[in-house]
Amino acid sequence: MNAQVGVIMGSASDWETMKHCCEALDLVGIPYEKQIVSAHRTPELVFEYAESARDRGLKVVIAGAGGAAHLPGMTAAKTTLPVIGIPVQTKALNGMDSLLSIVQMPGGVPVATVAIGKAGATNAGLLAAQILGISDTEIAGRLESLRQETKVKVLNSNDQLT
Ligand code: RP5
């Protein structure tokens, strides 16, 4: 099946975080593509990727980066597809640098920013699925089942309070 979501990251070192986003997409059965595209090291590729994203059939782009994390914003500058930004947790500043770089977009060019690190990556995958679920009832149904499973897990977790 053709990819509906594009998952990009600034470096192979981001994969440890970004794999959680891909796991969420796998869980809901969303076809995606993944690629390393660096805002600072391969800027031409960022523009090429973002400019061709819609014509290649993508519906949402998820971009993760750490530090001076310009990848989500630069991608959003070159496409009107929804862009979800994942702030990767850094060693120096714990991901606050990534978060502020991604979340503080100027008015007119939105990036939907999720939490720093693993939780944010998981939520980015789910959020992309929810966007696709607006017009795809099968995806919406799978998301509903997933919520039910999560609910049952919580209701059955009291035995862990030992
Ligand atoms: C960013 O620089 C990447 O997104 C990564 O989080 C960070 C560090 O990259 P490496 O030096 O590990 O390649 O562009």
Image (cartoon, rainbow, N blue to C red):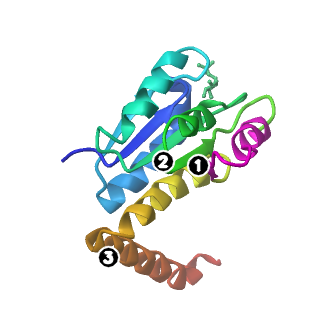
Q: Residue at x 72, y 29 (%)?
A: 67
Nearest the eye: 53 or 26: 53
- CB under 8 Å between discs 2 and 1: yes
Q: What's the CA distance linking mark 3 and mark 1?
A: 25 Å
Task: Please state the extent of the stretch shown in magenta in the rendering.
Answer: 95-113
Amino acid at dot 1: Lys
Q: Residue at x 32, y 71 (%)?
A: 142
Specify whether tag 2 is near ligand 1 (CB below 8 Å): no
Q: Residue at x 48, y 40 (%)?
A: 79
Amino acid at dot 2: His
Q: Looking at the picture, how far across and down is residue 134, in whole percent?
A: 39, 70
Q: Nearer the viewer, mark 3 or mark 1?
A: 3
* Dot placed on the residue nearer the N-terminal end, 2 or 3: 2
Q: Nearer the viewer, mark 2 or mark 3?
A: 3
* Labelled disc at residue 141: 3
Q: What's the CA distance linking mark 2 and mark 1?
A: 6 Å
- Left or right of 81 on screen, residue 117: right
Q: Secondary structure at mark 2?
A: helix
Nearest the eye: 154 or 77: 77
- Left or right of 136 on screen, residue 37: right
Q: Quadrant of residue 132?
A: bottom left
- Furthest residue in direction top, as rendered: 41
Instruction: Please determine whether, in this image, residue 138 is positioned above or below residue 24.
Output: below
Q: Which residue is identified by label 1?
A: 118
**Quadrant observed for ligand 1 in the rendered image:** top right
For the image, the number of numbered tags is 3
Q: Secondary structure at mark 1?
A: helix
